[in-house]
Amino acid sequence: MNKQKIIFTDSGLGGLSIMADFVRLSHNFGLDVLFFNAQYKRGQGYRTMDKNMQVKIFDRALKSMQENFDADYIAIACNTLSVVFQDSKFKEKSSADIYDIVATGQKLINESAYDTVIEISMPTTVNSKIYQTKYKNVISIAANSELPDAIESNNKKLIKKILEEIFFELKNKLIEQNLLNNKLSLFLGCTHFPLIKDDFFTNAEKFGINFNQLLNPNTEFASLIFDIIRKAIDIPSSSQANSLKVISRVKLKDSELAGISSIIDKYSHDTVRALLNYEYVPDLF
């Protein structure tokens, strides 16, 4: 039987933590697992593009995934790209089964233990209102677009500054709505954010905000993809190692490699090795 191929993709490197968690769960499935960095150009992320350009560039990336790698499954491990994907022309043309993290996030919010959910996401995600629901009171805060890069490079000073801005805005909103003392769920709507979840809680406490529940779509999405593939394929009785690869059309900085590696190492050493030996393909898409 041919190896099943699955691609995890993100507009940066945050989705590697989801791939790493999936690899941990499926270590003996004998899969071809690829992380496809869909960042278009250094200094020109999706957050700098208008909506039409976002769709155009991500369609090119998806087309490359299909034509060059012939994936059986594509997992969009990125909230921003999941939002962009909703308008994708490629959506109906793909031969692969495509899953995006937004559906997982929506389910988590709807099933939250508390009526008020604080969504902290990137501007594209917040502006789309994709996590607004009639079942919960969702208060959305758009994080500074520099936060994912700061997390990847482990820039603690910039992370602290941006988080303080987030919680200053959030506290004012909670006071306006008389919700500061209510029980709250925290939803982290960017795949980078759960990587520093402790920093979110620490800064919240400094502003007198208490979260009673964390909604982390990263771990839920990894488990979902694992369950889908486990049910779809026959797992041989003898253990077969997965084949892992990371590919990018932008050169990754040493600080990015070191920062993300230190985070995902607790999930999967093999994913760290694949990242450190990533393939640079400038004409990837």
Image: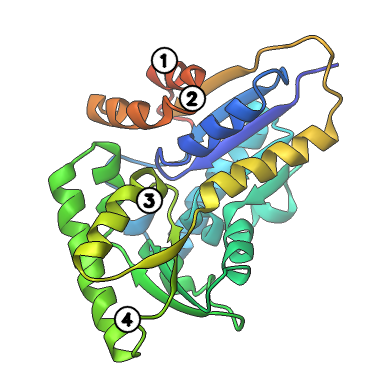
Between marks 3 and 1 in the image, the one whose residue lies nearer the viewer: 3
Residue 171 in which image quadrant: bottom left
Q: Earlier in the sequence, mark 2 or mark 4?
A: 4
Spatial CA distance of label 4 from label 1 is 47 Å
To which residue does mark 4 refer? 180
To which residue does mark 1 refer? 277
Q: Earlier in the sequence, mark 4 or mark 3?
A: 4
In the displayed structure, 285 sits above or below 93; it is above
Between marks 2 and 4 in the image, the one whose residue lies nearer the viewer: 4
Residue 14 drawn at (x, y percent): 42, 41
Q: Which mark is residue 193?
A: 3
Q: Is residue 31 visible?
A: yes
- Asked if the residues shown at circle 2 and circle 1 are in contact, with their CB atoms under 8 angstroms apart, the answer is yes
Task: Check disc 3: other Cα within 10 Å, few if <14, some if 14-19, many if 20+.
Answer: many
Between marks 2 and 3 in the image, the one whose residue lies nearer the viewer: 3
- Of residues 93 and 269, the one drawn nearer to the viewer in this rendering: 269
